[in-house]
Image: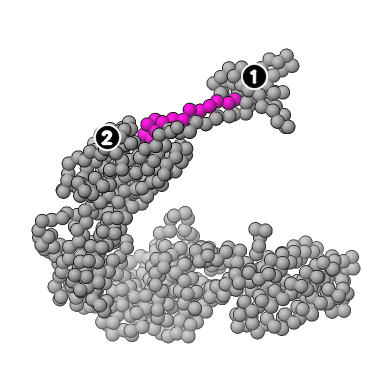
Amino acid sequence: MSEYHDLLLEIGTEELPPKALRSLSEALGEGMRAGLRKLNLGFEDIKVYATPRRLAVLVSRLAGVQPHSLEERRGPALTAAFDDQGIPTPAALGFARSCGVEIDALETQESGKGAWLVFRREQQGRHVRDLLPELVRQQIAALPVPRRMRWGELEETFVRPVHWLVLLYGDEILPLRLFGLEAGRETRGHRFHHPGRLYLPTPAAYAPLLETEGRVIADFSARRAAVRAQILESAAMAGAEAVIDEALLDEVTAMVEWPVAIRGGFERRFLEVPAEALISAMKGHQKYFHLVDGGGRLMPAFITVSNIDSTDRDVVRAGNERVIRPRLSDAMFFWEQDRRHTLASRLPALEQVVFQRRLGSLRDKSDRVATLAATVARELDGDARRAERAGHLSKCDLMTQMVGEFPELQGVMGGYYARHDGEADEVAQALQEQYLPRFAGDRLPATATGRALAVADKLDTLVGIFGIGQVPTGDKDPFALRRAALGVLRIVIEGGLPLDLVRLLDAAADIYRSQGRALEAGEAVASQVYGFMMDRLRAYYLEAGINIEAFEAVLARRPAQPLDFDARVRAVVRFQALPAAASLAAANKRIGNILRKAEQDIPGEVTPALLAEPAERELAAAMESCEQAIGPLAVRADYSGVLTHLAGLRGAVDAYFEQVLVMSEDAAVRSNRLAQLNRLRGLFMQVADLSCLFNQA
């Protein structure tokens, strides 16, 4: 019977990159899980730990020995293994050598299909002390380290220098030498509160010992929860609300081992600067959490999370206030200086900034976006003049000192400066909305001009980059074309905008040509971008839980309007649940096959006099009634209504295929029946290609 003990692996390092800590920890845990399973070593659970100075994995109740196994290899057939005198052939001898045994050690296996030589050997399970060191080396080497480094005279590399190793199975230290260190049973506590060694009697003692004696909360999730709780408590004590950015919370958690939240403040005069600029200074430079009042207005206060439980927190507070003040002063200086010049006055400066070498300057892009935004606005019955103005001003804030210092404020500051310049409020709002959505789940532009500008900006980039052949490949997408494509689709579909995507792509390409910029893709660029965007749309629907068959059925019709595409997809999904759906999909597929195989021209009209069979006439009558009913429904895009009426054809269609021979020997009758099926297929194709459905069956 195998022994079971807990296993602890800890890698003690210098401070690890905060933004990579969680992914490194999770990768190590998943790697160990997969590795142990591959080694056929049973265990109960795996828990990972991560702090700025350590990565650790605790495996509970790990089997000490692999289970025994039977190795079996089949060799040549007996007819090929021995000659007529029973002497082993070279094939048999070679098989025995490959198994490391003499020919007499091989056995015979017989079945109804013949007899073969076979080698069987019981494999003794290996102990974890023999297996774990190599597994650990493999998993550490496989970690997704952002940038590896060497230190001292070592050839081995890691994300940061390693100072101690622990590899403990039960109360036994497993032999491992790595990074010039021998694994032991001693960990280290907090760098300042307990810099000395801590003796680990067993793996299970790891986290409790670090917390009680080492002043280290090793569990990332527990430490994250503690940071959040302290921030909320500190904010409540000030009668404020802390705004907790989850990414910042992760980063701060990765920077501390013993979190202590401390509230600080700054002078009210800084609140004259736009809140976004102050927040960027606090979050980006100092990793502070900002506070707001009950109305959501920024307060002159912040919360920082220290890695030291100081005996004099006022000193720590004062130090953080002293550090942030120059940052806020810079923001105020930029705010005051930038407003001395209008956004429009910065347009000439854009001519000196390259958007893309072959696509011109940012001024060229602004002009293109302005023209396309006006086109989009007209299609939406919006204000084309304001959309065009927003397009011209859209990149001007890139020339300001504030955006130069805080690039994440592009667009945001443009809106503030536009209002200061006296631009229309909708123009200013559009400038702040032009980059939306910035990421999955982000909000969409709320104003008509903002939507027009956001769509135009993204389509201009897509058409231009595709036009010069720089299509995204693999993980390489330097112009964020995937995000741009999905952004346009979300704005159009979720915003309910009846925009013709194909027409807008053609318009974007024409605008490039009007600037004298030849696109390598030529007339095909719109089709290429449309296909690329449909790939993004496929992923969008899959994430929403819509089956791929419904998407492909609609894609076969290539609707030009994404909003129309969405209406069709959702109608098809509802149609799939109808009892008649599978039968009609099969019939549609059958019709398609018949029409493809027909080696003749198919008439455009059906001749009623040639409908000889009752089933033909019944189908013709049913189709006539259906066509009259679905015509108005299709006009108002009631695709569910169209498909519901089509489902009513099931009985007539089933009877037709049971009773009518389409490929009649009478040429006139055959042509007429093909014409009727072609007309029926046209009905089926009103919404989508129904033959794409139920293909898994």
Residue at screen point 69% across, 66% down: 582
- Amino acid found under the numbered disc labelled 2: Gly
Quarter of the rendering containing residue 429: bottom left
- Magenta residues span 119-139
Residue 566 location (% of width, % of height): 55, 73
Q: Residues within 10 Å of mark 1 (few under 14, many from 20)?
A: few
Along the viewing direction, whichever of 50 and 345 lies nearer the viewer: 50
Can residue 201 be seen here? The reply is: yes
Quarter of the rendering containing residue 458: bottom left
Image disc number at residue 90 = 1
Inspect the magenta stretch and tell me whether residue 619 lies in it: no
Residue at screen point 34% across, 44% down: 57
Whichever of labels 1 and 2 marks the residue nearer the N terminus, that label is 1
Residue assigned mark 2:
184
Along the viewing direction, whichever of 605 and 633 lies nearer the viewer: 633
- Amino acid found under the numbered disc labelled 1: Pro
Instruction: Measure the alpha-carbon separation of dots 1 and 2.
Output: 52 Å
Inspect the magenta stretch and tell me whether residue 124 lies in it: yes
Residue 349 location (% of width, % of height): 30, 71
